[in-house]
Each structure stands twice: as C-alpha cells, then as structure tokens.
Amino acid sequence: MGVRHFLTLSSLCGDELLSIIQRAAILKKQFIEKNFETTLKNRVLGMIFEKSSTRTRVSFEAGMAQLGGHAIYLAPTGSQISRGEPLEDTARVLSRMLDCIMLRTFAHERLERFAMYSDVPVINGLSDSYHPCQLLADMLTYYEERGSIQGKKVVWLGDGNNMCHSYMNAARIFDFKLIIACPEGFDPDARLLEATKAFVSIERDPKKAAKNADLVVTDVWASMGQEAEQAQRIEKFLPYQVNADLMACVNADALFMHCLPAHRGEEVSAAVLDGSQSVVWAEAGNRLHTQKALLEFLLQ
C-alpha cells in the first residue's frame, strides 16, 4: 500500500477512524497514568504553520515527545516557503528528511499539492475547507461522554466553514443526522452538501434546528482571514448564538462542543460555554490523544 495522507476525514474509512479513536482512548489512559509507550521512537514530525495555532501545535509537539519522537516547528517566516520556494519543492525536500509532515494553511488546494509531492504522510492541521483532526477529538469526546454517536442528532450553528464541512463528512462516516443552522449566504460547500444529503440538511430557524438535539456545536463567526468581516457577521449570526434559550430546545442530556478559541457573548454565551453541558475542555485535551493515535496509524 502507498503512503497514506490525512487531508479530510474521508481520507480514511470508517473502521480505520474508529480504530484511531479506540486507540486514542488507550493512549489517554496511559497519559493519565504517565505510562507512555514510545511507539514512535526516533521518528520526526515536521510542522508547517501558515496560520497561527495553540492547540494544534502543542498537541502535535507534545504527542510526538510522549511517543518517543520529535517535532520540528516551521513558521511562515522561518522557512524558504516565505521567500517563494515552490510548495512542490518544499514537499520533495522535507519528505526526504522527515517521517511525517503536518501542514496548517489557508487554501485546501495547497495541502493537496503538498501531499502529491510528498513521499511521507501529510496531515491537515487545518485548512480553509476542513479541520479533520478536530473531528477525531470531538468523536472521542462524545464516545467518552455518551457512547456511540450513530443515529444521534447533531446541530451545527453558524458559518458553513471548515469545521462545518468536517462535521458533514463525519455525519456520513459515523452515521448521524446533522442539521446545519446558518443564515442565507453562509451555506457550506454545495458539492459537499449534495454528497452528504442523506445525512445532512439545512434549517434557517435555529431553535427548530436544535429541537431534540443530542449534540450542539458552533465555532467563531469570523475565521482566520475573515477578521475584516467581523462586524457584518455579528449582525447576521446573532440569531444563531448558542445561549440558554437555544439550549432549552435540545435534549436534557445534550452536550455542547466548540473547537476554540471561543468568543463569549458572540457565538456562545458564557453561561453555556462554562456550563454543565459543555465538554469543550475535555474536547480540547482530546486533541493530544487522537493525534497521537493518528500519528501511530500513519507511521506504523
């Protein structure tokens, strides 16, 4: 079998993703017990960041250290990419020095081009179109808290962005119902919506969308690179804020997730983010364990 990349959730099949989540649960137990398996001893991960990061950088770097390997951080201004070296050339060179490469970038096409010229696995650490590593953490978190997500109702509130797209892929792979509540003009990608229509639908009324939901998910209203649209987006998205009124529509045991960083008082109220139904801190911590399991899968 040739080199495997992880550019979207659909890069792997459902059984492979489930095996990663199950392995992550074992690695989490080892982390709590401080009993680490150095399964990636002497392996090196290269991390290229063209967007800022907290959780992605720390979780990958800490994860490689705990698995016995090493991670190298490359900032946009600290490599030849910033001086115009073609992406294809960078991929060719780095894949002859590294065992795996994580790229966090803007256009998803950059990831696809990089992977095409890389001889080692390439991981999507976030692009404008998808954020699959976050979905691994979200699925582990739901599994820990409520068991299987199959057949459950998930409501996404806000922009049809990279996180929304990854939830659409997750709905198809893990077999749950996804309702996307967003204002007109901010729908997810039409081709992806067509491909996942058996599992995904759009509802403009946020409270109707949230009725009897098992999981509520949102994200910032202006993603990286959209800061200039912040004021306009606040006006459009305010009816889609996750607050006590909206959470009154969901099932009593429903969970709330957010990939962070969050803007209290915008996409989510402080009462919900810090409330009893919120699992955002466990969700963030699970980035470490699912990415360790992903690295093991791709490198072993």
Image (cartoon, rainbow, N blue to C red):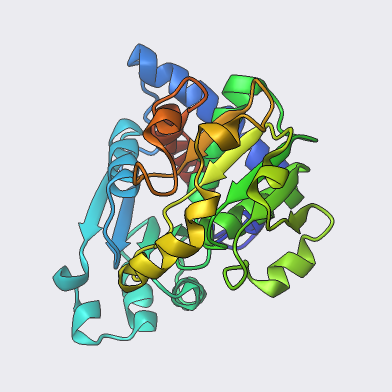
Q: Position of residue 259 (x, y in %)?
A: 44, 44
Q: Position of residue 110 (x, y in %)?
A: 44, 76
**Image quadrant assignment for residue 9:** bottom right
Is residue 297 something one can see in this rendering? no
Q: Is residue 11 left or right of residue 50?
A: right
**The N terminus, quarter of image:** bottom right
Residue at 67%, 49% (x, y): give it.
170
Q: Residue at x 66, y 43 (%)?
A: 207
**Which corner quadrant of the image does residue 224 belong to?**
bottom left
Q: Is residue 253 above or below residue 219?
A: above
Viewer-proximal residue among 155 and 166: 155
Horizontal and vertical percent position of residue 92: 37, 76
- Give the camera-side residue of 236 and 291: 236
Answer with left or right where residue 122 lies relative to residue 245: left
Q: How many marks?
A: 0
Residue 216, image x, y percentages: 59, 38
Residue 7, quarter of the rendered image: bottom right
In the rendered view, tell whether residue 18 sits above or below residue 91. Answer: above
The one of 298 and 136 positioned closer to us in this rendering? 136
Q: Nearer the viewer, residue 164 or 287?
A: 164
Residue at coordinates 66% horizontally, 54% vertically from top-left? 180
The relative height of residue 23 versus residue 55 in the rendered view (above or below) is: above
- Classify residue 278 as left or right of residue 153: left
Q: Residue furthest left?
A: 78
* Residue 166 visible in the shown view: yes
Question: Outermost residue, top direction?
Answer: 33
Q: Residue at x 40, y 69 (%)?
A: 232
Query: Along the horizontal axis of the image, is 61 left or right of 149?
Result: left
